[in-house]
Amino acid sequence: MALLVKSDIDRGREWDEAFARAMPGLEVRNWPDLGRLDEIDYAFVWKPLPGELKSYPNLKVIFSMGAGIDHLTSDPELPKHLPIVRLVEPGLTEGMSQYVVMAVLAQHRFLLDYAEQRRRKAWQELPQVAAGDRRVGIMGLGALGGDAARKLLPFGFDLAGWSRTPKDIPGVAGFHGDAGLGPFLERTDILVCLLPLTPATEGILCAETFARLPRGAAVINVARGAHLVEKDLIAALDSGQLSGATLDVFEVEPPSPDSPIWTHPRIAMTPHIASMPIVASAAQSVADNIRRFEAGEPLLHLFDWEHGY
Ligand code: OXD
């Protein structure tokens, strides 16, 4: 049984070793050393080349090496009859929750303001806001959003979540569907986007959404660049409707050198690093799912074409 592994960063023999532990007997073929294409049963990939996946005639399952699957579904030649599995693994979830907690705390404690003061060599204390008076709202309460919400709970924020269907997380006020969006936004000072990218969520972080947030709210986007209309964000920051943004993902990655994102004083940015799979736990999760598939059991975290995630 052979598994193709294609990652965007060179992890040397790390994947081989992790899969040897998680599933002895599984042969790992590291892209581009593929050997015979008809021997590949499974693919665990990040950003495969367009048309690539259709060239493995005996492929049974495509495993995404990321929580998102848009890097797969954007391939017009994707073999759509094959099951696609989203990566849900403890290392990826933990990394994302760390990033969200860091970004929420940074907005809550005015780190952008203090960075600006520092550039001016100014020394000015800003009032501290009690966590219970800060309304944090998470869009998307799947594996990542749900965990981030639970990790934020101990800080005492006034927490809410918005999702397509109702979700019950103790301590997190639940809003859902189109009807829930307005009331959710109106009560949110720090908005975190962890939605899957679907036709319904593309461009959701736009002028209309920002206008429904309380004046001076902050936005954190750790989902996909296509969720955010960057020109609307810049306009909302410049008008003061928004006080700040933390962005890990962008319309174009990296943004073009003349994009105002690079230098805007109210934007903190990182190069799409909010979370990455941890080799050992990701290999374990893929191996467990291959075992299930081989035993005729349903795959976990299967991508659903109808809902788009
Ligand atoms: C992911 C990502 O989808 O890193 O996991 O963007």
Image: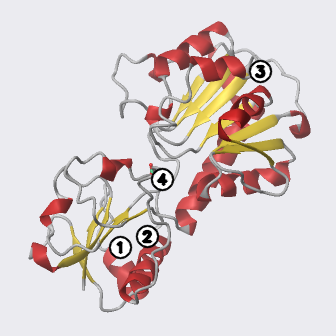
Residue at 44% from the left image edge and 37% from the top image edge: 199
Of callouts 3 and 4, which one flags the residue occurring earlier in the amino acid sequence?
3
Of callouts 1 and 2, which one flags the residue occurring earlier in the amino acid sequence?
1
Q: Residues within 10 Å of mark 2 (few under 14, many from 20)?
A: some
Q: Residues within 10 Å of mark 4 (few under 14, many from 20)?
A: some
**Vertical order, 59 against 219 (above or below):** below
Mark 3 and mark 1 in contact? Answer it, CB < 8 Å. Answer: no
Q: Position of residue 216 (x, y in %)?
A: 74, 18
Of callouts 3 and 1, which one flags the residue occurring earlier in the amino acid sequence?
1
Callout 4 amino acid: Tyr
Residue at 45% from the left image edge and 58% from the top image edge: 304
What sort of colour scheme is used for the picture? secondary structure
Question: Residue at label 4?
Answer: 309
Callout 1 amino acid: Glu
Q: Secondary structure at mark 3?
A: loop
State the mark number for residue 199. Answer: none
Mark 3 C-beta closer than 8 Å to ligand 1:
no
Callout 2 amino acid: Val
Question: Residue at label 2?
Answer: 279
**Residue 109 shows in the view:** no
Among all residues in the image, which is located at the extreme top?
A: 239
Q: Position of residue 295 (x, y in %)?
A: 40, 90
State the mark number for residue 214. Answer: 3
Question: Residue at label 1?
Answer: 14
**Vertical order, 50 against 92 (above or below):** above
Mark 1 C-beta closer than 8 Å to ligand 1:
no
How far, Cα to Cα, is label 1 from label 4? 29 Å
